[in-house]
Amino acid sequence: MGIPKNQYKINIGHLFVALTLLLLIPFSYIHSNNTKIDSLHNELEKFKKLNDVSSVGYTLDKIAKVYNKQGNQTKAIQYLNESLDIAQKTKDKKLEQLVYFHLGFVYNQMNEYSKALYYYTTYSNISKSENDVKNLVKSKIKIANVHTTLGDYERSYELLLALLHEIDQEKDSDQIGYIYYELGSTFFYQENYNEALRYYSMAKDLFKEANNLTSLYNSLGGLGSVYSAMERYEEALAKHSESLNLAQELGYSYGIANASYNVANANLSLGNYVTAEQYFHQARELMQQNNHNVGLFYATAGLGKLNLRRQQPEKAVSLLEEALTLAQKTGSNSHLIKIYEEAANAHYQSGNVDLAFQYIKEHNKIKDKLVNEETAKNMANTKARYEIQKAEKDAKIAILKKDAQINTMYLWGGLVATILLLIISALFYSRYLLQTKSNKMLAQKNKEIEQQNQKLITSNKALEQFAYIASHDLKEPLRTISCFSSLLQKRYITQMDESAQEYFEYIINSVRRMYNLLDDIMSYSKIKDGEIEEDVVDINEIVNTVVQNLKVEIDKTNANVQIENILPEINANETQMIQLFQNLISNAIKFRNGKTPQINIGCSNDDEAQNFVFKVQDNGIGISPEYHEKIFDVFKRLNPRQKFEGNGVGLAICNKIVEQMDGKIWIDSAEGEGSTFFFSIPKSRLN
């Protein structure tokens, strides 16, 4: 059965209607807010005449909220300060708490992060003094959000994990959802996309269950951003379109603007330039109406990237320089790092090599601050501490339950003992035995916890050190070599003879291969041996996703990918299953030996071993039997690099993924006769 190819077809009429609705929504929204402000002002005058000071304070806070939604932060702050003055004079802690939160929120929107931190911290202190647990948790989440925006990921991560530990037993799905969302953002900016995807997905499920539509909108946008970063653009567009529809249903003006930008960005990545430009302009206009500098920065930068893709570097430079000015106003390193890289590329294409090099240096300087080995190690240690505390807490709960059982037995024994002294003795003796046994259990449990803690810390340190040395310490000199080589080649190309130009090509190609090798090492190291998040995964959908990911190579080689029978659903990690099939199918295309690739995918029963056996069969160059075991070793290559690219890591990754699922992978092949890769999955994993 052939795999259908998904195509996004634009109906111009529908697009016109959709964009018209998008333009009308914010104006109707503003009109509605103006009506609401007039009504609130009437209420305010009424309360002033009645000398109802408390109601005046709360009404001022409500008016400020409406002004903030309109994007008039100056007015909002004016009314909030008036409300705060009343709260402090009347000693109304509830109103004071509310105003401090809204002041923090407004200053955060205005990118004045030091003030936002001050007001959120004050709000937190009041919540703590009032023993208001719910608002205390809310304040800490907001504080963590500001730290994430400022690039202080370590502090944000520590706050969020501590919060998760504190409220885990309360099962407050909304609050846990907010924490998961912020954790997703922290990992996203650290470029740990698998963890970001996991936390955003958990947040989305909780918000959906609680019918918290605004937060559901945010989590859908987060998922879309992760998919974009992972270059899974079809999935990104689907999530961003879903979040845009939800924002329109809610009448959420800023949400519509933000989702429009995300939809534009996904279309840009897919090469749909006309649609991308329409949504970028839409987002930019809405951000200007809302006076939102961060959103305006993103939309302006998006238009700059679009013009860069269209080979119009002069227009791109103008827009990206405007975006850089906006990013500098926000004071956010997370924003600056994005724009410096794009601006450097634009200046390079327009011939301004010196300024391009200057921007590259600024980009690398900020990246060193945001993504560094020490931060990653500290985050890993923080996670280890949290898991240790959780394990100890679970052990103590188990012992307390056992002790409660012993005390219950002791109480009943005491009542009966008034009649029979012999029963008293027996119960005391029984309690002694149970207590001794419990103490032994506690000692054994503590020993096991300590051993597990040491293993966990050692494993985390080794893995994190390896992974981040590969991504940071080794890639940094490569970036420098690549940058200077490109600059030298561009500047002095007219002065070079053929040999010199050839030498530069050798340097640049070697750097590229080293980059690919480091990326492969990172992929291999991220497949952990411990527990991973699993869910029901449809293998038919997995293969369709892989085919879309490899669409360029498939079209270039006219490859024909066929599914022989319906593939099952299994319990597995979706990302790892995509890695597994993508490595096998891309190898089948790569090692084609000049033929049109014919790739057959199927699944059969092995009733005796209680396994399902999957196969990926090709008509490529084949592999001699003497190498059938060796090809699954890491860095094992059988062909010269000049003929086939790669680092010999792909099949090692496949082997590790299958072994982690209690399966086995093997090959049936002969040289020149194609290859069939088989891997088994226990039937116990089938849905």
Image (cartoon, rainbow, N blue to C red):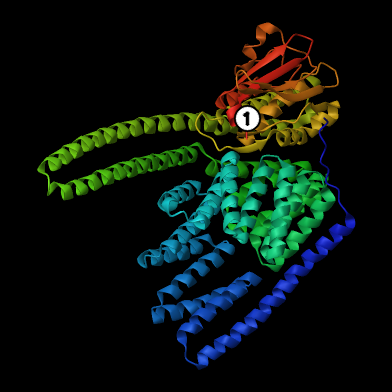
Residue 43 at least partly seen: yes
Residue 521 at least partly seen: no
Q: Position of residue 387 (x, y in %)?
A: 42, 40
The 10 Å Cα crowd at callout 1, few under 14, some 14 to 19, many 20 or more, is some
Q: Residue at x 61, y 27 (%)?
A: 683
Q: Residue at x 54, y 65 (%)?
A: 105
Q: Quick check: 627 left or right of 27? A: left
For the residue pair 523 and 546, the one nearer the viewer reads as: 546
Q: Quick check: 19 left or right of 292? A: right
Residue found at the very far top of the displayed protein: 626
Q: Hey, which quadrant is residue 66 in on the image?
A: bottom right
| Above or below for 290 versus 452 | below
Q: Position of residue 37 (x, y in %)?
A: 63, 80
What's the residue type where badge 1 is placed? Asp
| Above or below for 687 versus 497 | below
Query: How many marks can you see?
Result: 1
Q: Secondary structure at mark 1?
A: helix
Q: Hey, which quadrant is residue 568 in on the image?
A: top right
For the residue pair 596 and 190, the one nearer the viewer reads as: 596
- The C terminus - image quarter: top right
| Above or below for 79 versus 633 | below
Residue found at the very far left of the displayed protein: 421
Q: Residue at x 72, y 37 (%)?
A: 541
User: Which residue position is annotated with label 1?
Assistant: 519
Q: Quick check: 308 left or right of 355? A: right
Q: Position of residue 272 (x, y in %)?
A: 82, 47
| Above or below for 404 versus 112 | above
Q: Quick check: 553 left or right of 335? A: right
